[in-house]
Amino acid sequence: MSGWRPKTSKTGGLPHISYEARKPVPLGTMLRNSVECTTGIFVHHDIVESSTDQWKKKYSDPPTKSSLPRGEMVSYHTAEVLRQAEGANVLRGGWVGGDAWFGSIESCIELKKRLGLYSTFIIKQNVQYFPMKILHAVLVARHGSRPAGHWVVMQANIGGVELYVMAYAWSSKGVAYMVSSCGKTVRHEQSYISRFEDEYGNVQEKELPRPAQAHMLYEFLPLIDEHNKARQNSLALEKCWMTKSCWNRIITTLLGMAVVDVQHWDRNKRHGYMMRPPSGFGDDDDDGVMDDFDIKTMANLIGRPLTDGRFKYYRKSNRPSQRVTASTNMDGRALTRIIGEDGSWNYAKNNPDEKTRCRQKSCFICRRYTPRTINTQWMCVRCNMPLCQIDRSDRKTRMYSCVVEHSMTHNQILGCGFVARMAFTMPDQLKAYKLTRSEKKKREERNDKRKRLREEAKAQDQLEEDSEDDESSVVSPPPLRRSSRFNK
């Protein structure tokens, strides 16, 4: 659905506007579409027009006779299924799946007879030739009041197509009805996990058997919903780019679909790689493959040419700081306050009037990207590495925040060793920045000064030890002894 809310007219400039109360965006231009199961990208769109115009589309005008036993005309939803399959260029022998709006006995038969395609559908309202009540009665008769995890199957040949219908109880009260022209009804090796609340309100889990064909259908049905969620909620171009033109809104929707398609294609190409940050951590076997892109990162990569100065009207907005919270990190708590030996967060006061100062250390991950010292009050709860709470990634030199990079990398120095460490030293081969000549000179002078101070302190300690040894080596006179002889 491309959301559009008219203000001055009935349709807001559109030829037709649709309303579907169950959708997250109920009002606007509705598109019925199909998605490719392997990559998850859209392959065909069909805009929903008015009722009169919809009946003028292929398989509806002129009315086409179906392959059903009584020779009925092709129904509205079956015509839509055939148009979607043809528009997606599904090869003969392929498979098509759909939810309850598209599913019926007629859809399976017409796909097999006209296009040579196998199919599996959910059945709810299109019950023509479908024995829904009989299947439910058989399920109750066989398994009683606890049918969860069981299913019953019937097979028939209708219109020259072998079909089987199934009633699968995915819970004690919920029953799903399906029709298919292919697949197996044996139990799949992966069980369905049912979640429910017990009498105390706690969420419990239970593994239930599931037929193989139902498992295949349920794995692919959420693909369109995931695509729409990424476009409408995560990317949200319709909410960011306000417009008063209905045509600009439709173009924005199609652009969002294209961005999500690119992200899904990239995700499919990267399938099988290990989830980790970019190369540069000193690993010999590092192939330089970055982590999977989320939809916002993909949009930033596509729109990066806007920041090169060619467009005068573009202004880069200040990105708000994204602080690490307990609900967004590993084990619920990735960071904790830096504490001293006494367990306190603050430095001890020399006098009562002195201000309270929190304990700070320089962020270890930031040392890799900048020569400046960036102090932080936080450290890893596992290895005590000082880390920034604020997300300092800029999507150019740094792709991840300090906490994410620390938790994801495989490098032994940058990563979390799950053991508390006392000292953190950044090797030169891990540094991602280059110093200028003046900065190198200042660093050398600073290192020479530190070295000189250490040598002076060491010499002073040696002098104090030598003076103590000299005092202890002074020869003292022997004590007086009593004579062992007695004078008579």
Image: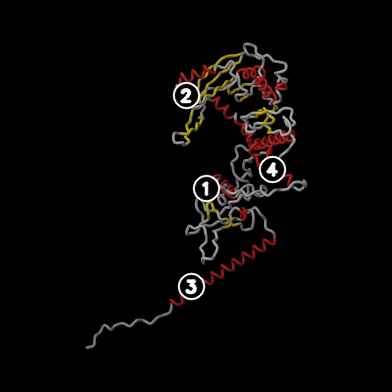
Tell me the distance, in whole angstroms, between the alpha carbons under discs 1 and 4. 30 Å
* Three-letter amino acid code of the residue under disc 4: Leu
* Three-letter amino acid code of the residue under disc 1: Arg
Task: Give the label, 3 or 1, closer to the camera.
Answer: 1
> Which image quarter: residue 429?
bottom right
Q: Quadrant of the N terminus?
A: top right
| Residue at (62% x, 32% y) in the render | 225
Task: Using a 10 Å C-alpha cutoff, classify the residue at mark 4 as few (fewer than 14 neighbours), some (14 to 19) or many (20 or more).
Answer: few
Q: Which residue is mark 3?
A: 465
Q: Which callout, 3 or 1, points at the residue further toward the start of the chain?
A: 1
* Residues marked 3 and 4 touching at CB (< 8 Å): no
Q: Which residue is mark 4?
A: 301
Q: Which residue is mark 2?
A: 147
Residue ranking furthest to the left: 488
> Which image quarter: residue 456?
bottom right
Q: Which residue is mark 1?
A: 333
Tell me the distance, in whole angstroms, between the alpha carbons under discs 1 and 2. 41 Å
> Which image quarter: residue 75?
top right
Q: Which callout, 1 or 4, points at the residue further toward the start of the chain?
A: 4
Location of residue 150 with respect to 393 vertically, above or below: above
* Element class at badge 3: helix
* Three-letter amino acid code of the residue under disc 3: Glu
Location of residue 240 with respect to 479 vertically, above or below: above
Q: Which callout, 4 or 2, points at the residue further toward the start of the chain?
A: 2
Location of residue 164 with respect to 424 vertically, above or below: above
Q: Which callout, 3 or 4, points at the residue further toward the start of the chain?
A: 4
Q: Which callout, 2 or 3, points at the residue further toward the start of the chain?
A: 2
Q: Nearer the viewer, residue 485 or 240?
A: 240
